[in-house]
Structures are given as C-alpha cells and as structure tokens.
C-alpha cells in the first residue's frame, strides 16, 4: 500500500469515527429530550423536580439504576428507567453531564 493510500484510508477512518460521534451526540440529545417534561429543557428543572444538568454522568447512571431496581422511591421513574438500555442511559447521562449546571 502506498503512502497516499494509507493517508486516504486514515482520513476515511477519521471521518467515519467523527460521523459516529456526531450520530451518538444526536441520539443522546434525542433520548434526553424525553426527560424534558419533568426535568426541564437541557436538564434545567423547575420546581421540586431534580435538575440533571451538570451532574456527573456516573451519578445520573447510579440514580437511574436505583430507580430500576426499586431502591429509590418514585411515582413513575421505576417504569421509565426500565424502558432504556444501559447504553441509552449512559448516552442520556453523558448529555446531561455536559449541560451547564443551573445557577
């Protein structure tokens, strides 16, 4: 393989990886949008609901796990948390962790 072919292959691989990351970012945003009714747009909750923006992804994943297994009392989060795969929960958690914390 010539040097030019290797460079082209590396460029294609880099573009493909960027596309996957952009696709994951869109997916994360779309999945997180389903949380807006209770937790506010971009995780900026109002009232008594928990704000998710700015929390660490690990904390959000742990909170959802607590709802899933019934260790945390809730009115509806038990059901909602069971509707997502672990990978989807990590995407949602990453999205909210990247949002600016409420001031």
Image: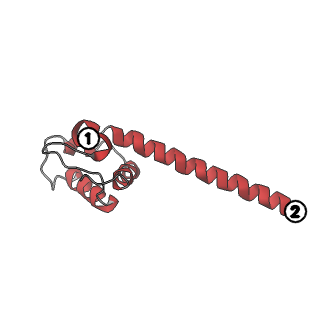
Q: Is residue 1 above or below residue 32?
A: below
Color scheme of the displayed model: secondary structure
Q: Which residue: 38% across, 50% down?
A: 95
Q: x, y (%) of residue 59?
A: 27, 60
The numbered disc on residue 40 is: 1
| Local crowd size for mark 2, using a 10 Å CA cut-off: few (<14), some (14–19), many (≥20) | few
Q: Relative to the observer, which residue lies in front, 33 or 101?
A: 101
Q: Is residue 46 left or right of residue 12?
A: left
Q: Which residue: 35% across, 51% down?
A: 99
Q: Residue furthest front?
A: 103
Q: x, y (%) of residue 22?
A: 53, 47
Q: x, y (%) of residue 41?
A: 30, 40
The numbered disc on residue 20 is: none
Q: Which residue is mark 2?
A: 2
Q: x, y (%) of residue 42?
A: 32, 44
Q: CA distance from mark 2 to mark 1?
A: 53 Å
Mark 1: secondary structure: loop
Mark 2: secondary structure: loop
Q: Is residue 27 above or below residue 97?
A: above
Depth check, mark 2 against mark 1: the one in front is 1
In the picture, the quarter occupied by the N terminus is: bottom right
């Amino acid at each position: 393989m010539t040097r030019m072919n290797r460079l082209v292959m590396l460029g294609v691989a880099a573009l493909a990886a960027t596309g996957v990351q952009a696709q994951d970012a869109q997916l994360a945003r779309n999945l997180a949008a389903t949380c807006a009714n209770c937790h506010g747009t971009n995780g900026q909750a109002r009232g008594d609901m928990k704000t998710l923006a700015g929390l660490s992804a690990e904390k959000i994943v742990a909170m959802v796990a607590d709802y899933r297994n019934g260790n945390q009392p809730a009115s509806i989060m038990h059901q909602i948390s069971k509707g997502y795969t672990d990978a989807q929960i990590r995407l949602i958690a990453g999205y909210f962790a990247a949002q600016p914390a409420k001031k």
